Image (cartoon, rainbow, N blue to C red):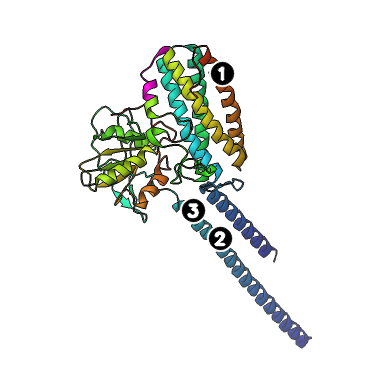
């Protein structure tokens, strides 16, 4: 009888271990972290991640353009800072969508998640408020020196104003803590950059367009 | 004495016999228990294996270790065709001949075609377009059989969608086709709901070999 008890015990132990390993592996394959919160495709979290990734991409692009169009250290450094920061933040937003298994595009249109679908014309590449048109980007690409710096600072000021408005939407509506924190940080950082850009415009005898 | 001894012998024999039977039945019981326990363990492992295999078979099927040139499309239940082999990603200067039109992957030129919602009205080089697919773009292509209204509607959609591009490909099989890295499908019109589905699945989708790569700063027409 002792032998039976030992065999049954061993069998039960093997079974439990096999089950535990299977569960752990299957869970890992599914990419599931049981504590991960997965927002819905039409949530503020998903919408902000999608839309801000697009919005940021244009800021990165504009910053690369101006760095090719001027040798001024102040503006080149600001552009470097914006390109680095926004490219990284964009990667975070897209990475979250990947983790959540959600699409990068939505047929709802930009900013529907904050009740502002159709706010921008969508014409000429201006998909969201504050974004530059393709024509404006082409113009930036033809200017050089001070003229390029001024247009860049004006376009980026408007870009930041639109971005801040959207980030405030997420700071208010997003449920995922890390994302709300990122959005709140964007609001602060971009507000202070708007002040910096106002100074840079002033010292070039110019001012924001609006 | 003799008879008493006989009796004692007989009863001892009976006792031994009884003990032997008890021993045999214990062995039989042990054997049954061992077999049952083993069966339970095997069943557990089989069930675990099935769960594991099922959880894996649901994953994306773009990765394949197949080598050679016997690649072909397999059509999924959703109508999306998936290339059967792993597609190479080397930057080359020589001309690449692709086994499908429009191509959905393979070696390509070092510079990508801009795919930030760019609409090209003239044909583009496949070898630049394939690089855009590597960066996660969806490529909308059409030939002269597509209606002007569809072409215009698709162009409007592409212009609103970063990480897509559009261009004419005259020698393709169907009037309107959508391609992503390793993926392709035909749609009947610009309003076919499969357009939106393909975009949602594959614009910077799971199939992207190089997530995060740019659709700007490349080549334009």
Task: Say which element carries label 2.
Answer: helix
Q: Is residue B2 left or right of residue B133?
A: right
The part of the image, by quadrant, that contains residue A170 is top right
Which badge, 3 or 2, is on the more N-terminal residue? Answer: 2
Q: Position of residue A106 (x, y in %)?
A: 45, 45
Question: Numbered disc 1: what chain?
Answer: A
Location of mark 3 (residue)? B55
**Could one spot residue A183 in this view of the protein?**
yes
Q: Which residues are the magenta region?
A: A137-145
Q: Position of residue A54 (x, y in %)?
A: 46, 34
Question: Numbered disc 2: what chain?
Answer: B
Category of crowding for the residue at label 3, using alpha-carbon neighbours closer than 10 angstroms: few (below 14), some (14–19), many (at least 20) = some
Q: Report, in whole angstroms, how far the alpha carbon at label 3 lies from the one at label 2.
A: 17 Å
Q: Position of residue B77 (x, y in %)?
A: 36, 56
Q: Position of residue A76 (x, y in %)?
A: 48, 16
Question: Numbered disc 3: what chain?
Answer: B
Q: Residue at x 53, y 46 (%)?
A: A31
Q: Is residue A28 left or right of residue A13?
A: left
Q: Residue furthest bottom?
A: B3
Residue B159's place in the image compared with B9, above or below, is above
Location of mark 1 (residue)? A196
Frontmost residue, B15 versus B23: B23
Q: Are marks 3 and 2 in contact (CB under 8 Å)?
A: no
Q: Is residue B162 left or right of residue B166?
A: right
The part of the image, by quadrant, that contains residue B102 is top left
Task: Say which element carries label 3.
Answer: helix
Residue B190's place in the image compared with B115, above or below, is below
Number of labelled discs?
3
Location of mark 2 (residue)? B44
Task: Say which element carries label 1.
Answer: helix
């Amino acid at each position: 009888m002792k032998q039976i008890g030992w065999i049954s015990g061993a069998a039960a132990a093997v079974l439990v271990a096999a089950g535990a390993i299977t569960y752990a592996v299957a869970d890992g394959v599914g990419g599931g972290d049981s504590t991960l919160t997965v927002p819905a495709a039409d949530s503020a979290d998903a919408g902000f991640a999608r839309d801000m990734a697009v919005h940021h991409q244009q800021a990165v692009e504009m910053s690369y353009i101006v760095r090719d169009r001027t040798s001024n250290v102040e503006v080149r450094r600001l552009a470097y800072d914006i390109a680095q920061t926004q490219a990284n933040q964009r990667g975070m937003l897209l990475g979250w969508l990947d983790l959540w298994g959600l699409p990068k595009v939505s047929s709802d249109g930009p900013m529907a998640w904050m009740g502002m679908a159709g706010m921008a014309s969508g014409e000429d590449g201006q998909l969201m408020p504050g974004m530059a048109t393709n024509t404006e980007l082409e113009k930036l690409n033809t200017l050089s020196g001070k003229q390029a710096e001024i247009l860049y600072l004006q376009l980026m000021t408007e870009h930041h104003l639109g971005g801040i408005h959207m980030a405030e939407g997420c700071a208010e509506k997003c449920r995922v803590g890390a994302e709300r924190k990122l959005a709140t940080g964007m609001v602060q950082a971009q507000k202070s950059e708007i002040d910096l850009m106002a100074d840079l415009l002033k010292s070039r005898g110019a001012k924001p367009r609006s | 004495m003799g008879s008493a001894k006989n009796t004692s012998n007989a009863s001892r024999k009976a006792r031994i016999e009884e003990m032997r039977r008890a021993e045999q039945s214990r062995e039989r019981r042990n054997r049954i228990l061992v077999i049952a326990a083993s069966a339970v363990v095997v069943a557990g492992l089989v069930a675990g294996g099935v769960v594991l295999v099922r959880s894996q078979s649901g994953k994306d099927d773009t990765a394949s270790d197949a080598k050679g040139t016997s690649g072909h499309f397999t059509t999924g239940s959703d109508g999306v065709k998936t290339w059967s082999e792993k597609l190479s990603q080397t930057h080359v200067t020589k001309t690449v001949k692709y086994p499908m039109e429009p191509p959905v992957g393979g070696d390509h030129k070092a510079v990508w075609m801009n795919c930030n919602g760019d609409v090209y009205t003239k044909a583009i080089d496949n070898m630049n377009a394939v690089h855009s697919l590597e960066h996660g773009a969806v490529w909308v292509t059409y030939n002269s059989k597509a209606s002007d209204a569809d072409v215009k509607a698709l162009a409007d959609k592409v212009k609103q969608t970063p990480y897509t591009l559009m261009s004419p490909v005259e020698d393709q099989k169907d009037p309107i086709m959508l391609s992503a890295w390793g993926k392709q499908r035909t749609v009947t019109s610009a309003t076919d709901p499969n357009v939106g589905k393909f975009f949602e699945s594959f614009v910077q989708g799971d199939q992207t070999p190089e997530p995060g790569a740019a659709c700007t700063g490349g080549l334009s027409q």
